[in-house]
Amino acid sequence: MHFSSKLLEQAVEEFGKLPGVGKKTALRLVLHLLKQSKEDVNRFSQAFTQLKEHIKYCKHCFNISDTDTCEICQSPKRDRTTICVVEDTRDVMAIENTNQYQGVYHVLGGLISPMDGVGPADLRIDGLVDRVRQGDIKEVILALSATMEGDTTIFYLYRKLQEFSIEVSTIARGIAFGGELEYVDEVTLGRSIMTRVPYERKVG
């Protein structure tokens, strides 16, 4: 792609680094921003600068938050005896949109994926075990994507949680294999949470 300006080329290259954004889409976005007022572009850039500088992660569940403790963990209406384990914040948002879950969350920050160099130590698994060890937890729901990485992570977490007297369950598989939670419609996801099943699998 030939550019008439180095500044234009640099801007397109930066937008092109975003997931799912190709060179043509990146160029369209940059040209759109060029048509906006200087004030609008400043607000756009400041939003991301402030996001990067001031965003926090909840000290309890590791969800993205504006404060040290997120709104969900702060809410007295939430059932703190039930923890729903998810891959990232997008999954928290997807489950919250169903209005079918009233417990709290634990965001792992990824899935175990040896092919990508991601092992258990790279995720917030120890934090989950610590929360369960502190007591008062009755159930842990493993709400992870129906992929090979998701199943591997579920199996690993099940083994880590076996020593505790709690129920470990998984969301019902109304979700096709290979499906990621953020792309599942709210009705299907809500039904999968409500009809979750105990995770029973022979170990060894």
Image (tube, rainbow, N blue to C red):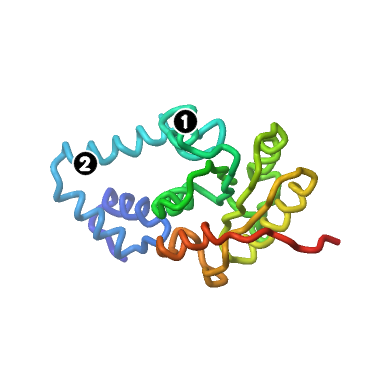
Left or right of residue 62: residue 52? left
Observer-nearest of 134 and 46: 134
Q: Position of residue 141 (x, y in %)?
A: 61, 51
182 is higher (above) or lower (below) than 42: below
Badge 1 amino acid: Gln
Left or right of residue 189: residue 172? right
User: Image point 53% across, 39% down: which residue?
Assistant: 79
Left or right of residue 61: residue 155? right
User: Image point 15% across, 47% down: which residue?
Assistant: 36
Quarter of the image where one finds residue 46: top left
Observer-nearest of 17 and 111: 111
User: Image point 36% across, 54% down: which residue?
Assistant: 13
Question: Is residue 26 in view?
Answer: yes
Disc 2 secondary structure class: helix
Q: Are marks 2 and 1 in contact (CB under 8 Å)?
A: no
Q: Position of residue 158 (x, y in %)?
A: 72, 53
Q: Which residue is mark 2?
A: 41
Q: CA distance from mark 2 to mark 1?
A: 35 Å
Ranked by sequence position, the earlier of labels 2 and 1 is 2
124 is higher (above) or lower (below) than 176: above
Badge 2 amino acid: Val
Q: Position of residue 128 (x, y in %)?
A: 65, 40
User: Image point 43% across, 34% down: which residue?
Assistant: 71
130 is higher (above) or lower (below) than 147: above
Badge 1: few (under 14), some or many (20 or more) residues near its Cα, within 10 Å? Answer: few
